[in-house]
Image (tube, rainbow, N blue to C red):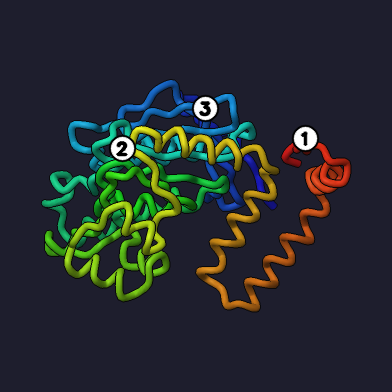
Amino acid sequence: MILVSSSRILRATTKQVSTLNTRGTKLRCFSSLRESYDYVIAEKRDDGVGLLKLNRPKALNALCDALFEDLVHACQALDDDPDIGCLVLTGSTNKAFAAGADIAEMKDRDFATAYKCDMFAGWGQIAKLKKPTIAAVNGFALGGGCELAMMCDIILAGDRAKFGQPEINLGVIPGAGGTQRLVRAIGKSKAMEMVLTGNMIDAEKAERDGLVSKVYPADELVDRAIEMAQQIASKSHMASMMTKEAVNASDEMGLQEGLRLERRFFHSLFATHDQKEGMDAFLSKRQPDFKNS
């Protein structure tokens, strides 16, 4: 049985509501978008798109703890918003999507500190968002920046974008998915080359290798990403969320298990209004009016 404890409702500016089980363990936190953040510009648009810009330009959007706390909060707030059907994540300038984790912030940490706080584990919340996400990458996406982009469902790149996992040059390895998601995106040999040499690749090679879906002129990138997000947001949110869950599950499942999950999601959508509306609209040769239910 799931209980909601009114004593755990936070009445601060975050307006968070914690859902608890009978032991009092937090299961999910629903948040509303703050009016402003220190390191993220978040916008709820009228077209069903949530737009998020990393905003630490003097540091090329280096991913300090405070920036990521802002980003996770804003992303989860937009993800929980029923009016939003797709999120676009980009940088506030064309110079950098994110140049990596904040080295100055973490250089003096020891093993015990990194281990006990499970450093970078919280970054994975971006990959767990229910709504589809698009990374619009201009400039540098290095280290944690490249890993953050790979947590999104689709990566679009500006024609001057650069991707890389240069952690080897710092005496460490990628710590937020670079040895795992990169292999799944571009294959073992190419991933090994990137993480062992620390070399960057440009947008054209990233598209050719399968890391990036499309490449656009840098000054058109965000507009094109929003156009794609608008198209996704116009679909049934329930169908797009199940599509995302099924595709992402393919990384963790064998083929037969994945096919079974796909069929069950397909079957379950016949219990929704949107399935009835979508098929009726197709047969009636009109645009569907999805209610996301």
**As drawn, 155 above or below 233:** below
Give the secondary structure at mark 1: loop
Q: Nearer the viewer, mark 1 or mark 3?
A: 1
Q: Residue at x 61, y 51 (%)?
A: 22
Which residue appears at 83% of the width and 48% of the height? 279
Q: Which residue is mark 1?
A: 289
Percent coordinates x, y for residue 285 in the rendering: 84, 41
Q: CA distance from mark 3 to mark 2?
A: 19 Å
How far apart are the two marked residues, 1 and 3, measured between alpha carbons? 21 Å
Residue 264 location, quadrant: bottom right
**22 lies left or right of 146:** right
Residue type, numbered disc 3: Lys
Q: Amino acid at mark 2?
A: Leu
Select label 3 or label 2 by which is in front.
3
Label 2, residues with CA under 10 Å away: few <14, some 14-19, many ≥20: many
Residue 122 versus residue 293 in the image, above or below: below
Give me the C-alpha separation between circle 2 and circle 1: 38 Å
| For discs 2 and 1, the disc positioned in front in the rendered view | 1
Secondary structure type for disc 2: helix
Q: Which mark, by number, is residue 251?
A: none
Residue at (55% x, 40% y) in the render: 86
Q: Is residue 232 visible?
A: yes
Residue 8 seen in the figure? no
The C terminus: image quadrant: top right
N-term-proximal mark, 2 vs 1:
2
Q: What SS does tag 3 mark?
A: strand
Return the residue nearer the eye: 280 or 124: 280
Say whether residue 258 is left or right of residue 57: right
183 or 16, which is in the foreground? 183
According to the picture, the residue beneath numbered tag 3 turns out to be: 44
